[in-house]
Amino acid sequence: MVARGPAPPGGDLQLAIPSARRELDIVVRSAVDAPLDGVSVALLSERYPPDRLRTVRDLDRVRFQGVGTQTRYAIPVVGENAPKELLGRLQSGDLIGHFEHARAGALTVCAYTLGGDLASSGPWMRLRDHADQLAVKCAPVEPDARVVILAVPPQPRLDEYGTAR
């Protein structure tokens, strides 16, 4: 909240809440020649060096420190639902995470793949149990950006003991 000057004597202090009207589209594509099942996209309200956010566990640590975060699941682009700014930039298999109220200024976007049937508990247990082994791809978002294209890597195959193969 931002105060709009001193309160008049005997009057009330007036506060204004800045609105976030910035729209931002995150185009997520596979870093390899394989389709994406599901992708979680996180928009962080601060700029972070990409080498500080390498795993889902790293991302969770930042989010739990009170950094403003918005999260979306990227969805497939179908026909006419593609934003006009993206026409000619999309590739087959791309997914989009759309943020309607992104904060102004420099941000960080991170994404990671979620494999399997997201309606079952399996992928969520894997995410919880192996967050330190699951890769996250992050990139800076410039203050005037309306579109960011991010190529996410596949997750490692984990054996029954939770070690990467």
Image: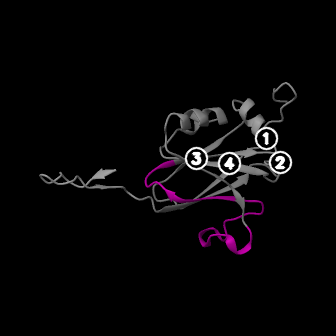
Scheme by which the image is coloured: one colour
Q: Rounded to the nearest whole Å, what is the CA distance between mark 4 and mark 3? A: 14 Å
Q: Rounded to the nearest whole Å, what is the CA distance between mark 2 and mark 3? A: 27 Å
Amino acid type, label 3: Ala
Amino acid type, label 1: Pro
The residue at which mark 4 appears reads as 40
- Percent position of residue 1, x then y: 34, 50
Does the image show residue 55?
no
Disc number lying in front (1 or 3)? 1
The residue at which mark 1 appears reads as 123
- Considering only order in the chain, which callout, 3 or 4, is on the residue closer to the N terminus? 4
Q: Are marks 1 and 3 in contact (CB under 8 Å)?
A: no
- Considering only order in the chain, which callout, 3 or 2, is on the residue closer to the N terminus? 2
Amino acid type, label 4: Ser
Front in this rendered view, residue 34 or 96: 96
The residue at which mark 3 appears reads as 139
Q: In the rendered structure, does residue 100 fall within the stretch colored magenta?
A: yes
Q: Is residue 117 above or below residue 164?
A: below
The answer to whether residue 153 is left or right of residue 149 is right
- Quadrant of the rendered image containing residue 53: top right
Mark carried by residue 117: 2
| Residue neighbourhood size for the residue with mark 2, other residues' Cα within 10 Å, grouped as few (<14), some (14–19), many (≥20) | few
| Residue neighbourhood size for the residue with mark 3, other residues' Cα within 10 Å, grouped as few (<14), some (14–19), many (≥20) | many
Q: Rounded to the nearest whole Å, what is the CA distance between mark 1 and mark 2? A: 7 Å
Q: Is residue 11 above or below residue 154?
A: below
Q: Which residues are magenta?
A: 78-107
Q: Are marks 1 and 2 in contact (CB under 8 Å)?
A: yes
- Considering only order in the chain, which callout, 2 or 4, is on the residue closer to the N terminus? 4
Q: Is residue 5 above or below residue 163?
A: below
